[in-house]
Image (tube, rainbow, N blue to C red):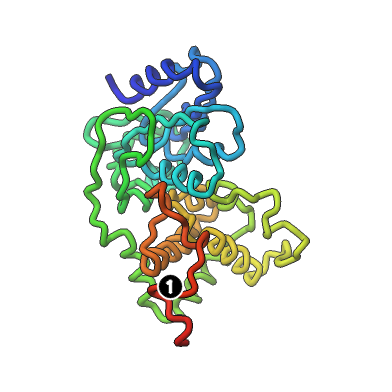
Amino acid sequence: MNNAEQIKETIARIFPDVETVICYQQGFDGLHATPYFISIPEQVNKLIWNPLCAQNLTSYLPSIKKKVGIVVKGCDSRTIIQYLQEGLIDRAKVVIIGVPCTGVISVKKVLREIGHQPVVDVVFDDNGNIVVKTQKGEKRLAIADVCPDKCTTCQYPTPLVYDHLIGEPIASNKPKEDVYKDIREFDAKTLEEKRAYWEKEFERCIRCYACRNACPMCICQDSCIAETREPHWISQRLSLQEKFMFHMIHAAHLAGRCVECGECERVCPMDIPVAKLKKKINAEMKELFNYETGVNPDDKPPMYTFNVDEAKIKEHKL
């Protein structure tokens, strides 16, 4: 029995105890999956589970008050742990169906490989490949070559918290020292080079706020500083200065909270590497506080605590 069938069976078993189950179904074409809300067991037949299931579905949890079931990957489960740490969800009202993940695909990377042609069909083989069929033929791509950047360093392919685990746990085969390798390489640049890099990237930003809207930890959208006029920190102008201000505030508000799910980067229509900012702050949190977001439910996020003297911060000597 494959994982999709096991998920369906598990959902059927938990349904008397939950009102809704959040999972995935096929999207508008063969290359896209979309969130799927099951309210009766008979709807389970539309459920899919494959490398198209890239979205972090946990974003819905803080706003849902009834008892729900949810299908999560390893990276998604870190969001649930962070929610629990911050008191944003009630654990008793969430039934977690964990599914070990061998990697998802980046739709953007696949579309680039096929020249943005309309997709007729998509098939996954048993050798870790995706076969994309278009009107001009088909192209076989290794999933490892078209996965999001987060998958290349993933340390938690198996969910860290769950009520039901589908299949066998998977251990990460990615070196831990490579997680922040790209950040260390970027830090080696001069300040002028870093500034020029971000000016070039943010120049493309259209202030659509897709990165904020998709972020599971951006829970205060109704009073987001990007739109509030009390206080009035930034305007709606499309100047580079205003773009910088928004992205710096967004990153700062995720200090010690970003679970590196990559949703901000996945949804960016301008292909800006916005996750790099949050990942840089996570690297600092690891260095200064030995804290990794969404890993240990008993941890307290660094920004939720206060110590007069921090072990690795010598502000009194500045």
Residue 303 in the image, given as x and y percentages of width and height: 51, 62
Residue 167 in the image, given as x and y percentages of width and height: 27, 28
Q: Quadrant of residue 164?
A: top left
Q: Is residue 273 visible?
A: no
Residue 318 in the image, given as x and y percentages of width and height: 47, 87
Q: Quadrant of residue 123?
A: top left
Q: Looking at the picture, which amino acid does disc 1 mark?
A: Glu
Q: Quadrant of residue 75?
A: top left
Label 1: which secondary element:
loop
Q: Which residue corresponds to mark 1?
A: 310
- Tell me if residue 238 comes above or below residue 22 in the rendering: below
Q: Is residue 39 visible?
A: yes
Residue beneath the point at 41% across and 68% down: 284
Out of 50 and 17, give the one closest to the viewer: 17
Residue beneath the point at 50% across and 59% down: 274
- Tell me if residue 184 comes above or below residue 90 in the rendering: below
- Tell me if residue 70 comes above or below residue 290 in the rendering: above
- Tell me if residue 111 comes above or below residue 11 in the rendering: below
